Image (tube, coloured by chain):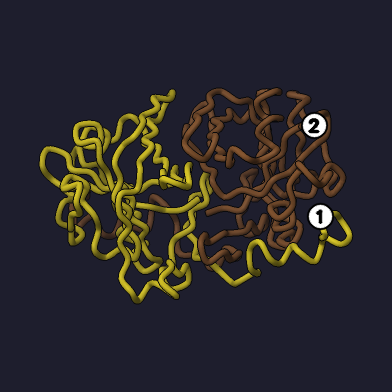
Chain colours: A brown, B yellow
Amino acid sequence: MPAALVGALVDGRPNYLTIAYCGAVNHEPPIISVGLNKKHYTNRGIKENGTFSLNIPSADMVKITDYCGLVSGHRVDKSNIFKTFYGSLKTAPLIEECPLSLECRVVQVLELAMQNVYLGQVIQAYAEDRFLTNGLPDIKKMNPIVFSMHDNNYWTVGEHLGRAWSIGKELKAGLGGAR
Amino acid sequence: MPAALVGALVDGRPNYLTIAYCGAVNHEPPIISVGLNKKHYTNRGIKENGTFSLNIPSADMVKITDYCGLVSGHRVDKSNIFKTFYGSLKTAPLIEECPLSLECRVVQVLELAMQNVYLGQVIQAYAEDRFLTNGLPDIKKMNPIVFSMHDNNYWTVGEHLGRAWSIGKELKAGLGGAR
């Protein structure tokens, strides 16, 4: 699972929550899903504004990332722990320190048993040039955090294994699909 | 993103498709989401049976994992490339070679613009003891594949960064939440 920070404006103040229940659900337009335990403070901000952000912290932000999952916005004001900026949606606070930030408009809400799942269309993605290679996000430059659940550990992304839609081609001759 | 293999029974034969659009959406009961481009052969099997599997391949399976994303079940029979087994659902083919396999019953289908998103309740999870530590999945023993999109590369999980719900505690004194 990825470790990510969801940003929302609650009572006019930015709040940031650490989550791992997130991922892509549609390619074009780009839509991501974000699942939040219904008890979380952040839910109210997302529902009221119909917007949120998903920010990908780098490995060197692992302590502050963990902190955002340890303390609730119900009790602690987390509005000043990052430098916040806003895009065209105006109500989705984005984290300047994160190598990648996605500004999202809610297109659908699923109320499951324990989680609210927000499907958010990515309106804009933000990354500094130093995190890109050939104009694309570079996972090694961004150095995101991998989370393993239940044993509760954080990890880096490791070594390169190969190119996708490529390294499997050599199996086509033996297994089928060659032409 | 994780690299995973979705299994479904199509016309009575197991078929396996590589995907990255997947993740957890609800904690209890455990529900995952899997997004498939609507053109994929696998959709019909999932819709007809209301079941599928999500299998996590290890890094040493990277070539066969890539292969399953390169060739379509429309043209190539992929039913024999893995050892298949079944659980109580009977219609969700599972991959014996994968360190972790989740057997799922469809609880909701979202038809988005390009993807069908299947929410699947995990009925059973399968892993051999050698991939567990203290009875829990061990990400280093399972050695899953991380996928970076657009530049299209596969990666391992790297070094340990710290314990979740733990290493951020030291920031409480300065940032708030200490008690």
Judge left or right: residue B4 versus residue B165.
Answer: left
Q: Nearer the viewer, residue B176 or B7?
A: B176
Please rate how many residues cluster around mark 1, counting C-alpha atoms within 10 Å: few if below 14, some from 14 to 19, many from 20. some
| Left or right position of A93 against B56 | right
Q: Amino acid at mark 1?
A: Gly
Q: Where A51 sits versus B124, above or below?
A: above
Coordinates of residue B29 in the picture (x, y in percent)? 41, 45
Q: Residue at x 35, y 54 (%)?
A: B66
- Give the image location of residue B113, x and y in percent: 43, 23
Residue placed most toward the observer, A39 or B85: A39
For residue A55, say whether it is visible. yes
To which residue does mark 1 refer? B177
Q: Position of residue A61 (x, y in %)?
A: 74, 59
Nearer to us of marks 2 and 1 is 1
**Residue receiving disc 2:** A86
**Side of A145 relative to A173 (left or right):** right
Q: Residue B17: which disc?
A: none
Which of the two residues, B150 or A98, is positioned nearer the viewer here? A98
